[in-house]
């Protein structure tokens, strides 16, 4: 199945990929990918390593030629345009700052290549250094800067030439966790007012969800699903996306009946009535996905909904939340995550406690066809 | 330290002997004087051969830089089936006895009917010194982040400007180190020059060799001292200017 591109805007897309394919010998790294990116949009290519996201990025940048299909930038097919004539800016994971040049010379590089007058370049360098909050750093060399500072210089260098399209290739991969989150916010704050169309490549799903307007989840060279972060999280199209984005309980189930107003499903011995929108899989063997935060633990069975009887097998304090593992019906292990803040009717459970496990929101439960094999 | 002394002691002896005041080579030197260095300056054949060696070494080094840098790129960046074989072939002059190479070169040149001349000598030196440039340039190139090229290209530099403004400046330390070694190897070379230099066109090492053979006086020691100092000077210059230690650690 092909993920239908759902560009939120009716204007002409800035970047359009049409059935883009790239092969290496017998291996198809990118397989008939189509994607529209609207002007000013921030789209993330998200997937495990080897899913083809970097190959796709290189095709857009011009470092690889597509085997088939088209790369269209602002209405112009650029398959055969050399990289230096594309006006596409790239920020790399390891910054790729020119080590023999100062910060100012790095920022000036693209402008010099465009033969800008000296006065314009000088002003632009100052402007860019202010923009990335590094005024006065022009005379330093890259090796004298921290990782975060180098990343900001790399961004300044690219933004100085006002690229048509900005590509970010795992730009935070080399930073430690705390700095990474800080840089995510900084970069987002920096880019958003400039309205520069951005393609962001990452394997970090939290990062993707945090930063993007839309996320294109890739697997085995295809875009499996392309949608807003919330839609990807709440309504994953298939098991791969469900498994890759966030954490989820994937439970073997059986769809007994399918009617216009609902599905009759048996999950881990519990009969449920789910909304029709939960699945397009038909009746028979299935896998039910429920997010850990969509399960509730109570001491007594809730009156209005079905619940499993289980026993807490594991309890972990993970900062703001409590992570529980609850064994249901001998074999099923459910991962439940609850806020640690205690409000009325909510308590911290201990290992060995007998609890009732119920769904919070049945609309957020998904049913998929069973895994192959 | 002891090992270093063991390696350097013979060199030290010849350098010290060159400062002798006597009419014959002696160690320890009998009296101290610069008379043999002054005498060296007045020996015309020494001056001429030194100038010629300098010319040959500069020419051979220049050609080696051009060829060596060009050869380093496919050796580092490309993956072709015979890459290891080509690498070994290009390095072979370092391993091959240079006497054998000199004889082979002479036979080759006479077989194709080219008379011995300074250009032939320069080209023969290129073959034995180009491995130094290839080695050190390849080492620098292997360390260079390949994304630098992509960054330069995406910022609007064509392939030539990318090479000139981004790649080459980062390879300079490696190229300079290789060139220093190449220059010294050519300037000091005796075995290949013995075969491939026109008998009327002596290089400095050939002159030195002749002086040692026929007329061993302290002038020979003085030439040796000059050669030693020159070699150290070139390597130290490369070390000081471009951080040889960083390259040598690879």
Image (tube, rainbow, N blue to C red):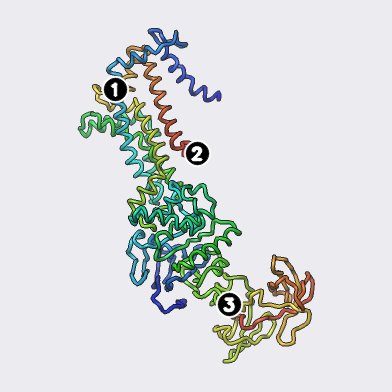
Q: CA distance from mark 1 to mark 2?
A: 36 Å
Quadrant for residue B25, please give it: top left
**From where the camera sits, is residue A372 visible?**
no
Q: Is residue B14 above or below residue A306?
A: above
Q: Do circles 2 and 3 both sit on a common chain?
A: no
Q: SS for tag 3?
A: helix
Mark 2 lies on residue = B249
| Cα gap from disc 1 to disc 3, whole angstroms | 85 Å
Q: Chain of mark 1?
A: B
Label 2: chain letter: B
Image quarter for residue A315?
bottom right
Q: Percent from the top left, x then y, of residue A158?
A: 43, 59
Q: Could you say where residue B205 lies in the image, as x and y percent from the top left?
A: 34, 22
Residue A334 at least partly seen: yes
* x, y percent for residue A172: 53, 59
Q: Mark 1 = which residue?
A: B49
Residue in the image at 73% along x and 73% along y: A326
| Label 2–label 3 contact, CB within 8 A | no
Q: Chain of mark 3?
A: A
Q: Which residue is mark 3?
A: A234
């Amino acid at each position: 199945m092909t993920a239908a591109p759902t560009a939120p805007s009716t204007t002409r897309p800035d970047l359009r990929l049409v059935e883009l394919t790239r092969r290496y010998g017998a291996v198809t790294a990118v397989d008939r990918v189509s994607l529209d990116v609207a002007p000013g949009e921030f789209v993330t290519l998200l997937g495990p390593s080897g899913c083809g996201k970097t190959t796709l990025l290189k095709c857009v940048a011009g470092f690889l030629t597509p085997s088939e299909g088209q790369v269209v930038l602002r209405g112009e097919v650029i398959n055969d345009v050399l990289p230096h004539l594309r006006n596409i800016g790239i920020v790399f994971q390891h910054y790729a700052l020119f080590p023999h040049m100062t910060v100012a010379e790095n920022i000036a590089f693209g402008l010099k290549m465009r033969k800008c007058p000296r006065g314009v370049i000088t002003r632009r360098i100052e402007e860019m250094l202010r923009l990335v909050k590094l005024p006065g750093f022009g005379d330093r060399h890259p090796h004298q800067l921290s990782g975060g500072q180098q990343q900001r210089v790399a961004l300044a260098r690219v933004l100085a030439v006002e690229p048509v399209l900005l590509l970010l290739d795992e730009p935070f991969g080399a930073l430690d966790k705390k700095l990474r989150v800080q840089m995510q916010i900084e970069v987002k704050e920096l880019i958003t007012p400039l309205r520069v169309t951005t393609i962001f490549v990452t394997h970090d799903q939290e990062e993707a969800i945090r930063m993007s307007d839309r996320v294109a989840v890739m697997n085995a060279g295809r875009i499996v699903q392309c949608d807003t972060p919330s839609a990807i999280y709440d309504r994953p199209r298939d098991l791969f996306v469900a498994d890759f984005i966030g954490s989820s309980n994937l439970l073997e189930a059986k769809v007994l009946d399918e009617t216009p107003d609902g599905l009759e499903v048996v999950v881990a011995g519990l009969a449920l009535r789910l909304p029709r929108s939960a699945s397009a899989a038909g009746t028979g063997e299935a896998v039910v996905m429920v997010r850990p935060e969509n399960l509730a633990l109570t001491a007594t069975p809730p009156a209005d909904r079905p619940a499993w009887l289980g026993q807490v097998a594991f309890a972990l304090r993970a900062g703001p939340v409590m992570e529980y593992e609850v064994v249901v019906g001998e074999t099923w292990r459910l991962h439940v995550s609850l806020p640690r803040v205690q409000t009325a009717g909510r308590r911290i459970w201990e290992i060995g406690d007998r609890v009732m496990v119920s769904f919070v929101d049945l609309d957020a439960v998904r049913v998929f066809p069973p895994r192959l094999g | 330290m002891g090992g270093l002394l063991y390696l350097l002691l013979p060199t030290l002896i010849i350098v010290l002997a060159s400062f002798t005041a006597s009419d014959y080579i002696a160690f320890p030197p009998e009296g101290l004087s610069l008379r043999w260095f002054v005498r060296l300056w007045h020996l015309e054949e020494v001056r001429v051969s030194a100038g010629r060696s300098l010319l040959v070494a500069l020419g051979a080094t220049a050609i080696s830089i051009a060829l060596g840098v060009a050869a380093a790129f496919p050796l580092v960046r490309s993956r072709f089936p015979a890459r290891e074989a080509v690498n070994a072939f290009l390095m072979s002059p370092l391993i091959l006895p240079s006497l054998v190479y000199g004889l082979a070169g002479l036979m080759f040149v006479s077989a194709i009917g080219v008379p011995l001349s300074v250009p032939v000598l320069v080209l023969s030196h290129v073959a034995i010194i180009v491995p130094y440039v290839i080695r050190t340039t390849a080492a620098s190139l292997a360390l260079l982040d390949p994304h630098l090229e992509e960054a330069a290209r995406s910022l609007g530099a064509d392939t030539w400007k990318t090479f000139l403004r981004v790649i080459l400046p980062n390879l300079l330390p490696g190229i300079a180190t290789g060139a220093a070694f190449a220059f010294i190897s050519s300037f000091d070379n005796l075995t290949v020059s013995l075969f491939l230099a026109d008998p009327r066109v002596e290089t400095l090492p050939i002159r030195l060799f002749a002086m040692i053979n026929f007329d061993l006086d302290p002038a020979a020691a003085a030439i040796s001292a000059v050669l030693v100092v020159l070699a150290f000077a070139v390597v130290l210059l490369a070390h000081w200017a471009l951080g040889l230690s960083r390259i040598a650690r690879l």
